[in-house]
Image (spheres, helix red, strand yellow):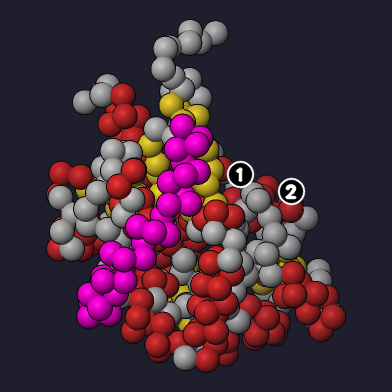
Amino acid sequence: METAVPGYPLKVALIYGAKPSGHYAAARAVAEFLPPSIIEPVFVDLSEVYPDFGPLVAKTYLQLLSKTPAVWDYVYDNDFVAFAASALRESILPFSSQKLADLLLKKNIRAAISTQAFASLLLTKNRRLARLPLFSVLTDFCAHAYWPPKGVSAYFAPEREVAAALKEKGAPPEKIFLTGIPVRKEFTGLQPAKAAARKELGLAPHLFTVLLTGGSRGLGELFLAAQAIKPLLGRIQAVVLCGSNRRLCRQAERELDEKKLLRFVDFTDSPALYYAAADLVIGKPGGVTLAETMALAKPFIIYSPLPGQEERNSGFLRRHKLAETAASPDQLPPLIKKYLAAPQALELASRRLAGHARPHAARDIAAKIIQLLTGNGG
């Protein structure tokens, strides 16, 4: 039985944009490694704090993606646009942050962990929170212009390139820690063999298995991808993780009849078993999706990336020869056939991804935060 220590546990806010999302998954991953005797995690969903603002941003974002994706790609990480927006930040963000500050002060929050740039910006622009330790966790393989260079106690970066970008933007080098993108404990433990995982999921134990994923929201042209690979069924089986995209599941039920070898899965809170069952993962290169894929060393094919961070994640993968790209659904079958015909290529891709994996990022981030908050450790 643990002995209570005066002043502990400290209430620490884990702030993310909305759920489901990669930001939320990353926050949960870090929370899993925070000992309850020292830290009491308090989850803060910005879309609940600002209920009108969240849907507006999401709607605008999705409209830009569907109608003018180049505009979003330009705005996303353009230094000139960021500079032009700086006056807006200085005038509006301090006012906008008052509601978040009220909430954190009311809950007696002693520190904050942010997995989203906007949350970090809000915190750094509020004078009442000036002394609140803020830990910023980057969840993509890029550091865009909206991460604040000042007012952050520590940055946790996924790769050296991201750490270097933060330094260029003005973040103090001594506050940048190279940890990786946090993934939940289910991705870090001993995984069942592929055949065992498939059997547990009701899949054919010894059939080459492709996992298609559109992230937590099930975005991307997943239905078209499933249609494209249908001729390969029998040589392969496929699972499509639909996230919160229920419309995709309903469409599959209406229009696809290959339910035995092509399965569409509604939102699952425990995706690690599906990854363990897979030989190959295809999907949008969201940062957390990639970190989970790397943690289990599953070869990855880039498909239907969103403009902005996912395009930059794709660039990271290509620079390091960690993934191939399918620019359209009809490019998927040849790539799958390539791996079917050459198991050694699959093994090489697996080894390369494993070389960049940082499966214990959440543990390392939690340990560093505890050290910085308590003053203990090296």
Name the residue tied to disc 2: 200
Q: Residues within 10 Å of mark 1 (few under 14, many from 20)?
A: few
Residue 104 in the image, given as x and y percentages of width and height: 46, 41
**Residue appearing at x 50%, y 43% in the figure:** 103
Q: Earlier in the sequence, mark 1 or mark 2?
A: 1
Name the residue tied to disc 1: 192
Is label 1 in contact with label 2 (beta carbons under 8 Å)?
A: yes
Main SS class of the magenta portion in the image:
helix
Q: Is residue 212 left or right of residue 140?
A: right
Q: Is residue 234 left or right of residue 151?
A: right
Task: Identify which amino acid the numbered label 2 is placed on.
Answer: Glu
- Of the pair 98 and 189, the residue shown nearer to us: 98
Position of 353 relative to 196 (above/below): below
Residue 82 in the image, given as x and y percentages of width and height: 27, 74
Q: Which residues are magenta?
A: 79-108
Position of 368 relative to 249 (above/below): above
